Amino acid sequence: MKLRHNAAFEARLLVELVAKIKNLDTIIALESGRIDLKCPCGAVIVPPTPVIPNLKHRQRGLLKSQIRRHLRADHGISEETIRVVLKEAFAD
């Protein structure tokens, strides 16, 4: 069983992650560049991947699932919190 981080660390981690995700979502929407995502903890969530215009919706889905997996497995964050974070990060 993993130890939970304190609330301040978890909040900072989630806020920084949302900011990074919003930036990546803008890149995907522009259909150019590369997406890569590193958690504020230092772990690579999504390695550098070129944005493919025909697959942008699938790439957003991949990004969401990788973030969900990382937050759940590595940080022990609840599914409800992850759902709220992803909703905020990918809000249109």
Image: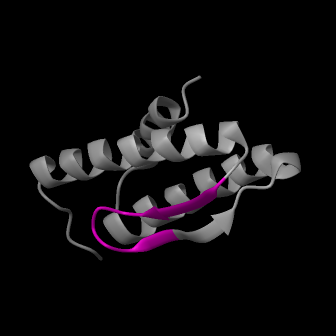
Up-down: is 11 above or below 43?
A: above
| Residue 26 falls left or right of residue 39 | right
Q: Residue furthest top?
A: 92
Q: Residue at x 47, y 42 (%)?
A: 23
Q: Position of residue 18 (x, y in %)?
A: 39, 42
| Residue 27 falls left or right of residue 32 | left
Q: Residue at x 29, y 62 (%)?
A: 40
> Of residues 2 and 52, which is closer to you in this image?
52
Residue 35, magenta (yes or no): yes
The quarter holding residue 3 reads bottom left
Q: Residue at x 51, y 32 (%)?
A: 87
> Of residues 21 and 62, which is closer to you in this image?
21
Q: Position of residue 58 (x, y in %)?
A: 78, 50
Up-down: is 65 above or below 44?
A: above
Q: Position of residue 6 (x, y in %)?
A: 11, 56
Q: Quadrant of the C terminus?
A: top right
The quarter holding residue 49 reads bottom right
Up-down: is 79 above or below 37?
A: above
Up-down: is 55 above or below 1?
A: above
Q: Residue at x 44, y 34 (%)?
A: 84
Q: Position of residue 89 (x, y in %)?
A: 47, 36
| Residue 22 falls left or right of residue 40 | right
Q: Quadrant of the N terminus?
A: bottom left
> Of residues 40 and 4, which is closer to you in this image?
40
| Residue 64 falls left or right of residue 54 | left
Q: Which residues are magenta?
A: 33-45
Say how many tags the image has: 0
